[in-house]
Structures are given as C-alpha cells and as structure tokens.
Amino acid sequence: MRSRPILRYLLAATLLILAALHPDTLATLARLGAGAVLAIVTGIAQAATAQPEAALLTAGALYITHQIRTHRPARARAHP
C-alpha cells in the first residue's frame, strides 16, 4: 500500500508542530523509543548467544528473503 506524498507531508508537519509545542513529551517519547529498540537488540543478542545455530539459520533465512524481495534482474538481450 503506497501512501500519498501529501499525507506524508501533513503527518510530518503535524509531528513537527507537536514537537515544538510539547518538547518534554517529545523527549519522553524519544527515550521510550530508544529503550524499546535497545531492549529488542539486547533480547536478540541474548538469544543468539544461547543458541548460535538457530541464530545463524534465522539470519541466513532473513538474508535470502531480503535478496529475493530486492533483486531486480536485468532484461535478457539477444547477442547479435
């Protein structure tokens, strides 16, 4: 689903206005977001330490999935 650029710009403008009006709330949200990301990364690191084989298989599967989704083959051309 592609969003329209005008909606994206309106959302960005709204967030900027809210940030200007409520800097303390923005700081709290940033702190919560950073804490959530740190907790996720810490959990993944601990799981990888506990089961390295499963972590390698999962990382390989994610890499292959990413390659499949992003690969755009060039059109084949006939040689003269």
Image (tube, rainbow, N blue to C red):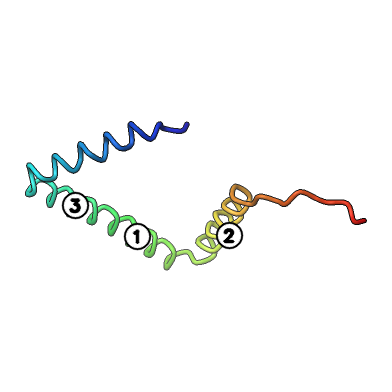
Left or right, 13 with respect to 53, comes to left
Q: Is residue 78 left or right of residue 59?
A: right
Q: Position of residue 51 (x, y in %)?
A: 47, 64
Q: Which mark is residue 79?
A: none
- Given residues 48 and 80, the one toward you in this image is 80
Position of residue 14 in the picture relative to residue 57 (left or right):
left
Looking at numbered disc 2 in the image, what kind of residue is underneath it? Gly
Secondary-structure class at tag 1? helix
Residue 60 lies in what quarter of the image? bottom right
**Amino acid marked by disc 1:** Val
Q: Evaluate if marks 3 and 1 touch, with contact meaning CB atoms under 8 Å apart.
A: no
Q: Secondary structure at mark 2?
A: helix
* Residue in the picture at 60% in, 47% down: 69
Which residue position is annotated with label 3?
30
Q: CA distance from mark 1 to mark 2?
A: 18 Å
Mark toward the start of the polypeptide (1 vs 2): 1
Q: Which residue is mark 2?
A: 60
* Tag 1 near tag 2, CB within 8 Å: no
Q: Residues within 10 Å of mark 1 (few under 14, many from 20)?
A: few
Percent x, y for residue 80?
Answer: 92, 56
Q: Residues within 10 Å of mark 3 (few under 14, many from 20)?
A: few
Say which residue label 1 marks: 41
Q: Residue 58 or 18: which is nearer the viewer?
A: 18
Q: Are marks 2 and 3 in contact (CB under 8 Å)?
A: no
Q: Residue furthest front?
A: 80
Q: x, y percentage for residue 59?
A: 53, 59
Disc with the residue nearer the chain's start (3 vs 1): 3
Q: Give the number of the mark in front: 2 or 3.
A: 3
**Picture quadrant where residue 21 is located:** top left
The mark closer to the camera, 3 or 1, is: 3
Q: Position of residue 79 (x, y in %)?
A: 90, 56
Q: Residues within 10 Å of mark 2 (few under 14, many from 20)?
A: few
